Image: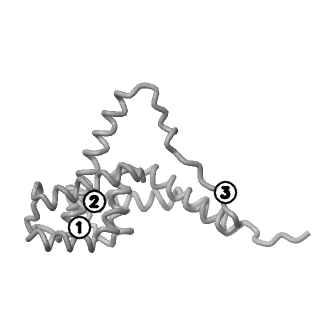
Amino acid sequence: MERAELERELERLHTACWGWALACCGRDHDTAEEALQTAYLKIVSGQTRFDGRSSVRTWVFGVVRLTAIEELRRRRTIHAREPGDDAEAGLAADPAPGADEAAERSEERAALVAALSALSARQREVLQLVFYHGMTIEEAAQVMHISLGSARTHYDRGKKALAFALAPMRSSARTTPRDVSP
């Protein structure tokens, strides 16, 4: 594949790649940005080559995933060398929502994020690829460099674990009165 074609494909896939990089980097924007830029550099410079064994999208997502893993490792090594760093120092406080509906959506989002973070890395990755990036389980397996059977297992277990973790939220939403009159 020629460089111009690769660049066009990267432009077309950029939004999805950004979301995938964020997922691979634990929602850390700086790390995801660095990983994505490095992945793009590897692709455009020819450090990694498309061999046609999968779709271009699957290949690019695989490069982003492996580059994100490398970046996370690099940052952990650097962080381990810096004494006195507080892991929570970089976290910004969420602004207070202005309406009940926004607060409810925020609580639902927080519950989903917490449920996803409780999953194993492979379960989280396969669910992210299938649900948010519209890949098949087979394509997700290729991106993750695991067998199809393993991807199916992680997918099934991840869905069940999410359903179990989110069940209390769904049942309380059904039983919570919306309008309470005296």
Within 10 Å of disc 3 (Cα), the crowding (few <14, some 14-19, many 20+) is: few
The residue singled out by tag 2 in the image is: 151
Q: Residue at x 20, y 62 (%)?
A: 142
Are dots 1 and 3 in contact, CB under 8 Å? no
Residue 1 can be seen in this image: no
Q: Residue at x 75, y 71 (%)?
A: 178
Residue 165 can be seen in this image: yes
Image quarter hosting the N terminus: bottom left
Q: Indicate the amino acid at tag 3.
A: Ala
Q: Residue at x 80, y 72 (%)?
A: 179
Name the one closer to the observer, 5 or 139: 5
Position of residue 67 relative to residue 131, above or below, is above
The residue singled out by tag 1 in the image is: 138
Q: Indicate the amino acid at tag 1.
A: Glu
Quadrant of residue 58 within the rendered picture: bottom left
Q: CA distance from mark 3 to mark 2?
A: 39 Å
Of the residues tagged 3 and 2, which is closer to the observer?
Answer: 3
Task: Identify the element where label 2 is drawn.
Answer: helix
- The answer to whether residue 57 is left or right of residue 20 is left
Are dots 2 and 1 in contact, CB under 8 Å? yes
The residue singled out by tag 3 in the image is: 96
